[in-house]
Image (cartoon, grey):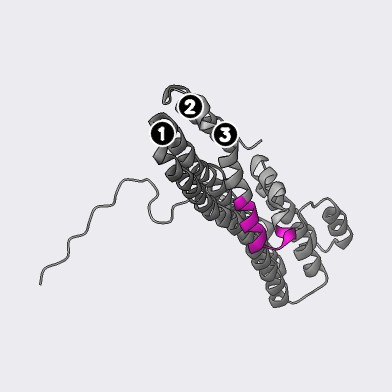
Amino acid sequence: MNPSTLIGIFASIGLLAVVMLFAAKEPALYIDVPSLGIVLVGTLAATFISYPLREVTRVFGLLWTVLRNERLYTRQDLDELVQISRLWIGGDLQAVEKAMEKVSNPFLRTGVQLVIDNTPEEDILELLQWRIARLRARENAEAQLFRAMASYAPAFGMIGTLVGLINLMFMLGSGDMDLIGRSLAVALMTTFYGVLLANLILKPVAVKLERRTEQRVALMNLVMQGISMMCNRRSPAYMRETLKSFIAHHDDEIRDGSPAAPRIKPQED
């Protein structure tokens, strides 16, 4: 499981436990099935109206994607690309074909295959850029689905609160303040559920998916640059050093952490 997601889950459970056990005299008041049903069913209903069925049914798979500790084998792809480039420059096409059978990255495999087939570099880059754009559009749409659900949940929380307040108005004539207070607490519970669902589950999932897309696109751009250098028959050593700059973790082109250079005073006329 993804470590940061696991930490967030335990932190949220701890937060809710503190709120329910120490911030309320009756923790059971925070559990209201009708209020939760209004938020969940209303959010799902609005989502089904807004999106096609096949996209909504992918929600559960996307949740598993967020929970899963998905690794991007950047170093492995870099090593495979450099190795294949070395074989390609050496003219050993049979060895290149065997090396491609071990490549697990389909994007990398497609680019190398096009190079072997002597496809013009412009056509290769156009195809790879189209695949990058398609992946970005598809995964951004998935993240947008969760952002839409995050906007629906608080709205249905307010709807549940309005329904509870309407019922509360009919009880005002009884004069039973204890009953009125409990009814008001239940009415506000739907807003609590809606805000909690939006900000603790749906929005974080959307941000996680967007961050995942950025990482995948960065890796695909790295591979595309390597394919471009392979087309131009750049040396494997040059390719390795160039692509390593793409995956440097502490790369700063403005400041490198060295002592600040002395400022040069402008000459006076």
Marker disc for residue 3: none
Tell me where residue 141 sits by quadrant.
bottom right
Q: Which quarter of the image is occupied by the N terminus?
A: top right
The residue closer to the viewer here, 51 or 182, is 182
Residue drawn where x is 58% and y is 54% of the image: 149
Is the residue marked by circle 1 packed among few (<14), some (14-19), or many (20+) residues within 10 Å? few
**Residue 248: in sight, yes or no?**
no
Q: Is residue 65 above or below residue 221?
A: above
Q: Main secondary structure of the magenta part?
A: helix
Front position among marks 3 and 2 = 2
Q: Mark 3 belongs to which amino acid?
A: Ile
What is the CA distance from the residue labelled 3 to the residue labelled 2?
17 Å
Expressed as whole percent of the image width and height from the top left, the position of residue 127 reads 72, 72
Question: Residue reaching furthest right?
Answer: 94
Q: Residue furthest front?
A: 173
What number is the disc on residue 9? 3
Could you say which is closer to the camera, residue 145 or residue 226? Answer: 145
Compute the Cα span from label 1 to label 3.
Answer: 32 Å
Where are the magenta residues, as a range? 42-55
Query: On the image, numbered disc 1 is attached to which residue?
Result: 181
Which of marks 3 and 1 precedes in the sequence?
A: 3
Q: Secondary structure at mark 3?
A: helix
Q: Secondary structure at mark 1?
A: helix
Q: Name the secondary structure under disc 2.
A: helix
